[in-house]
């Protein structure tokens, strides 16, 4: 059983930064993409960013472009989400996910097979 484990969430003031990390526990597994999603209270789950595990190419939702950076470290088997210039509307539970899908960037939750439990990010003064 593959379990993804996120870390790095917390409370930060508007304009601040956080870096989230996600790595698998248990057995090793293959993946083509890893992504980050978020869910704010009362809202649907929202795609944030994804990275192609082989090439490192990335995709972002418009609201985080220029502020968030997704990256991966193949040697450490870890994906990161660097979040800068955080805003109160970024407050949410952030979850990482992985998929074996090929082709275009997967931006829908159902396209991912493996999920973490999430880490809380709160942006507030």
Image: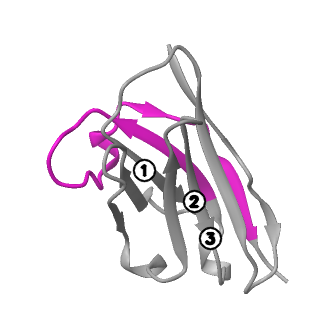
Q: Is residue 53 above or below residue 17?
A: above
Residue 67 in percent (x, y) is at 54, 80
Q: Quadrant of the C terminus?
A: bottom right
Q: Secondary structure at mark 2?
A: strand
Tags 3 and 1 touching, CB below 8 Å: no
Residue 95 in percent (x, y) is at 55, 47
The alpha-carbon separation of the residues under discs 2 and 1 comes to: 9 Å
Q: Is residue 74 above or below residue 125?
A: above
- Mark 1, other Cα within 10 Å: few <14 / some 14–19 / many ≥20: many
List the residue tagged with mark 2: 81
Give, as a single range, the part of the protein colored magenta. 93-122
List the residue tagged with mark 3: 83
Q: In the image, what residue occupies the spot 24% across and 55% down?
A: 105
Q: Secondary structure at mark 1?
A: strand
Q: Is residue 100 magenta?
A: yes
The disc, 3 or 1, on the residue closer to the chain's N-terminal end is: 1
Q: Is residue 97 above or below residue 41?
A: above
Residue 52 in percent (x, y) is at 33, 50
List the residue tagged with mark 1: 35
Q: In the image, what residue occupies the spot 48% across and 77% down?
A: 64
Q: Nearer the viewer, residue 74 or 26?
A: 74
Asked which quadrant contains residue 89, the reply is: bottom right
């Amino acid at each position: 059983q593959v379990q993804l484990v996120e870390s790095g969430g917390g409370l930060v003031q508007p304009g601040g930064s956080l870096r989230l990390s996600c790595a698998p526990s248990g057995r090793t597994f293959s993946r083509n993409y890893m992504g980050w999603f978020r869910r704010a209270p009362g809202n649907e789950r929202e795609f944030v960013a994804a990275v192609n595990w082989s090439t490192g190419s990335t995709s972002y939702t418009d609201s985080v472009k220029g502020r968030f950076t997704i990256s991966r470290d193949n040697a450490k088997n870890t994906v990161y989400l660097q979040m800068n210039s955080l805003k109160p509307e970024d407050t949410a539970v952030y979850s990482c996910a992985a998929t074996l899908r090929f082709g275009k960037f997967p931006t829908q939750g159902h396209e991912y097979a493996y999920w973490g439990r999430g880490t809380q990010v709160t942006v507030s003064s």
